[in-house]
Image (cartoon, coloured by chain):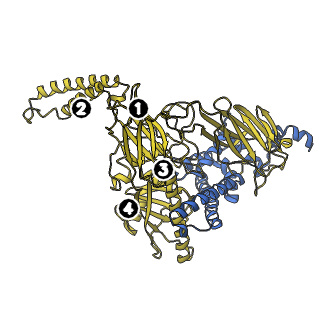
Chain colours: A yellow, B blue
Amino acid sequence: MPVRTGPPLIAGCRIPGCCPGCGVNDTLSWRLQVSGPPGSQVVLEFERQRNLAGRLRVEGGAHWRDDHTLLVPAGESWVHGLSFHSAKSPMTALPAVIGAAPASATTRSLDQPAPASMVRFTVVQYLSEVPVNHAEMAFDLRDLGLSPAKAEDIIDLHNNRQGDSAIILVDGWRESGFVNDEIYRAADRANVGNLLPILPECQSIFDRLEIKRARLRGFEVSPATGVPERENTIEHEARRLGQDVRNLEVQLDNCGQCPYGKQCNSEAIVFSNGDAMAFDENIDVWTSAPNDVFYARLGSTHKIPVTFWILPDQAVDPQAYFELTRTRILSDQLRANQIFEEYNCGIAFTTAAINDVGSDPGPALPIGPDCLEANRLSDEIGHIQGHINIYYLPQVPETFDAITCPPHTVLILQNAINEALAHEYGHWLTLGHVDGFDLDNDGLHDFPQTNLMMSGGLVKYELTEGQCFRMNVSPYSVLNSLGYRTGPTRKCRDIDINADCPAVFLDVKPD
Amino acid sequence: MDFNLYNRYPFRFHLILTAVFWLCGSHTIGAETSKIAEQPSVLKALADWFECIECVDGELQQVLAYGKDVKPLLLEARRSGPTPAVREQYRRHLGTAYRQLSEYAKAHGLDAQLPDKQAYISMYMQSIESRYQGRAAAALEKLSASSATETPASPGRLRLIP
């Protein structure tokens, strides 16, 4: 049975002062909601507690397995009587999800609504009748590590240096039609079943469509003579070509379910720890026979140089402050690199220099998230073209942690949280905030609270494959706009889900 | 206090006591704070303000919209920083992050860039202390500035959430 663990749940308020004047007898109630396939349940193991079963009152389907472990089945349950007054060691429960093994552990498009293998767990903490804290978790119980047992066509991974279980997304044609973002896991070779070349009738329609589109784009120039034709002829030709293009787009949409009037390419995207994302968008090795092999070549991680600038804090010893901030920068940078590697994005940030601005009295400091102020700092202090420039500010009035500003600039407070820098890198690589996304319209949030690109929350570190893909291929990503990656680009907005753009929330576990 | 009764109906008792304090015109911080703390929208606005990174989506303005009624909560945050639950959550997160960083640093020969575990956790724990206290102070400062020119908000202006 698959088991997944979640972040610890800690009894207590999220906001200071939510229980003013509470006595030692005031306790919390937790409302626990579990949804998922039959047989799924959440196990809550309370730390450092004895005889909880006798002290906490439980309602609903939840029941005690032993004196500190609560089993919570699908549905709603309540636990009453949780103490939260200990500042040193608040009551803490570690959640784990156990589910029945999913029927099929091969592939699926994650662009589709949440499958039956997904377990959702929500905890709302109540003081009296007031919700004072909450947590949401989603666990995908599928084991995507398996490929079809029958060896047919193969994707062969070259140069997977860490030998990790790479994540492979496949677009292509099968007898049943076009498949989008099928998921495979492999360290070296993935059996991907029998993939076909594009259906001949679709290819024919697409070729004609491309010709018509090209002519439409240049319709004011006569294809025969290369000189402008008379105006009324131009308008007539444009109307006719426009109608032809629309007709062919409809035909292509109806041809093997290839959406949006686009050619459905045979593609492979490979995400692997410590390697650049491999993206092949026109695979032409698939034939109607089995045993075709496609070689996906993994390359070195893309590296983006970063220059840091430490602005002085007049209140403390300059040398001590520089050393303290330097330590902070190295830790922030290390965390960013570890996250971008662990979540398979294949992007790294190199520290080109850590500069001590150190002037006395130093430039005037921004007092808020203001990009005009960032521009002023660039002018007064310095800015290295082609690098991301990060300005570490001392503890100015705390109205923000960090902000991105053009051109390729980040303002960040010296005492920002440990993932603020990684979050800002995400912005420079084109990611937006993901709070409240429900792109698949299933009524549930697409992203966990721990996604790196949540605008709030203190604990955020995860990235999805959909986010990694966008950071790599967007022409607006600093990776491409500054020329640190060469390769095909695509304009995939966060809301785009189609044959060209995997869903931004597409996330394959384990990473 | 009848503890048996209290234990049997703790929630109701808490509300009754709060109401009694309020109706009697008690001006203890506890009673005032309870009144507004019972509104989830206030708690959300404060959480958004305390936890935002860029803070450019009107997080501070949402807090200020509650006027002087939110002041006791801000005073408490300025005085005591984050709650024990938030501290514990972040401390555990830092411990996990440090373990991951150690493995990453070791694999990449970057051990020298990582401070020891205690220093790492302490460095960032201080960050959230100053963040909560600093942001509470910033909001209080704005409130004070606006209250000098505006009529104080009355309890009737509270946005009560069912």
In front: mark 4 or mark 2? 2
Same subunit: marks 1 and 4: yes
Task: Give the CA distance from mark 2 to mark 3.
Answer: 35 Å
Front label number (1 vs 4): 1
Amino acid residing under circle 3: Asn
Q: Nearer the viewer, mark 1 or mark 3?
A: 1
Which mark is on residue A344? Answer: 3
SS class of the residue under badge 1?
A: loop
Amino acid found under the numbered disc labelled 4: His
Residue at disc 4, secondary structure: loop
Please tell me if label 1 and label 3 are on a single chain. Answer: yes
Residue A387 shows which numbered tag?
A: 4
Alpha carbon separation for disc pair 3 and 4: 23 Å
Q: Secondary structure at mark 2?
A: helix
Compute the Cα span from label 1 to label 4: 45 Å
Q: Residue at x 20, y 31 (%)?
A: A211
Whichever of labels 3 and 4 marks the residue nearer the N terminus, that label is 3
**Disc marking residue A210:** 2
Q: CA distance from mark 4 to mark 2?
A: 39 Å
User: Residue A10's spot in the image, x, y percent?
Assistant: 71, 48
Vertical position of residue A281 compared to residue A175: above or below = below
